[in-house]
Image (spheres, coloured by chain):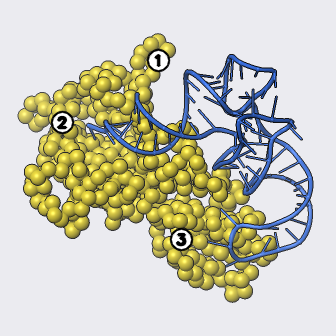
Amino acid sequence: MRLTELFTKTSKNLPADETSKNAQLLIQAGYIYKEMAGVYAFLPLGLKVIENIKQIIREEMNSLGGQEFIMTTLQRKELWEKTNRWDDRKVDVWFKSKLKNGTEVGLGWSHEEQITEMMKNYISSYRDLPAYVYQFQTKMRNEKRSKSGIMRGREFVMKDMYSYTTSDTTHQKFYDQTIEAYKQVFERVGLGKKTYLTFASGGDFTQFSHEFQTLTEAGEDVIYLDKSKKLAVNKEVLTTEVLEQLGLKRSELQEVKAAEVGNIFSFGGTKSEQLGLYFDDEAGHSRPVILGSYGIGVSRLMGVIAECFADDKGLVWPQAVAPAQAYLISLGDDSKVAKAADELYKSLTEAGIAVLYDDRDLRAGEKFADADLMGIPWRIVVSDKTLTQHKYELKARTNDQTQLLGTEDIQKVLGNSH
RNA sequence: CGGGGUGUGGCGCAGUUGGCUAGCGCGCGUCGUUCGGGACGACGAGGUCGCCGGUUCAAGUCCGGCCACCCCGACCA
């Protein structure tokens, strides 16, 4: 994409009404637009990051046997009354509205009820199981106070997957596989070293749920981490008995702040019983379907990545999620330079490398500053200076070393880096 | 939902004890000079000062109500 054509531009000023690093930088760099408190639009660059993250998750969920679909945002009141969660005193994040005829509807803040209800249409026998389904949905949650930019919005993108199985054994196997798949996801988006499996409250259904917590000061959770065992316990469930049960020693735990980027938990048969989702087993006995739920906050993940890697010059995207691999800069008004830059842009693009081409008529400093602010992994400069050697200057966002390379070598470096 | 703070061109801000055509920086347009880390000159466009009401000869400025945004707390299956 040529920057002369890209919709949105960067700003020299930080937004005054944001304090979180992720929102400040993402707005300043033109990735997102704030509609209101806790509600952000994703502009072309931001959408690209979201889509890159989604694609990684999609691949991992598909490898588990997950099938993608999409539910609706409008949900029926009756559905939620079955599990006693329509009442505002039970669930305080509801956005509710009414149809023209007065029928009450809710805007989905979660979809497990809805999907489980739907499953009654398609599951009646053990032959129909297991079923693993997932979606990327915009969740609506009427938080009393939103904060931390896109890390905690009132409207946000979430991947939620649900497993429907015949037995606890099958369920547990899938659950464990999902833990591994989640590790892959966080590894691939660049957060592998900072993200830890964490024991958390299991709610009404099981003793524990599992969270994936990424270490960052911007997080809202406090976890107790055993780095050598790569395990953590959420502060909310930390007791002597729990530590004993998990084989962890209090003296080896450090208290750290973290952001919850994923959460998985088991419902057993309880939710199915509430909603009436039963299947007939081989012997003809009716039994509740075993349900598991697996979430990843996609837009939150984007915010966490921004928080974790940004430096004093701006955003720094890991290769796998960056909106482009390279930021190509042409310097000076020499037509030879423009022509060489055009050609390089063309050949890189044809090689399948996503390039942001800064073909604007600006001075060097402004282009460099924008390249840094936008956080594109590689920067390529074409100028009189580089052309005298028939080469281009390549530099990584994360260090100051530059090297002069020809087109093929640049393609090689960029091609190998993602 | 309790406590505190802030609303002035697209963005960031200033605006004395109420007083004249409401300023500044960035950005934007035209022209010229520049051109490897956010250049410079000239000219120019752009604002019902969050909204409603009140006090006053006169309100961006004072008073009341409302709305929005931010921070702290509570909340976060």
Could you say whether the residue bearing mark 2 is in a helix, strand or loop?
Answer: loop
- Of the numbered discs 3 and 1, the one sitting upstream in the chain is 1
Q: According to the image, label 1 marks what residue?
A: A99
Answer with left or right where residue B70 lies relative to residue A119.
right
Residue B17: quadrant of the picture: top right
- Of the numbered discs 2 and 1, the one sitting upstream in the chain is 1
What is the CA distance from the residue labelled 3 to the residue labelled 1? 51 Å
Q: Label 2: how many residues lie within 10 Å, few (<14), some (14-19) or many (20+)?
A: few
Answer with left or right where residue A189 lies relative to residue A29.
left
Q: According to the image, label 3 marks what residue?
A: A397
- Depth check: A333 or A277 in front? A333
Q: According to the image, label 2 marks what residue?
A: A204
Could you say whether the residue bearing mark 3 is in a helix, strand or loop?
Answer: loop
Q: Chain of mark 2?
A: A
Q: Which residue is situated farthest in the left direction here? A: A283
Give the residue displayed 31% in from the left and 50% down from the top: A221
Q: Indicate the colour of chain A.
A: yellow
Note the chain letter of the blue one.
B
Would residue A356 be visible to someone looking at this image? yes
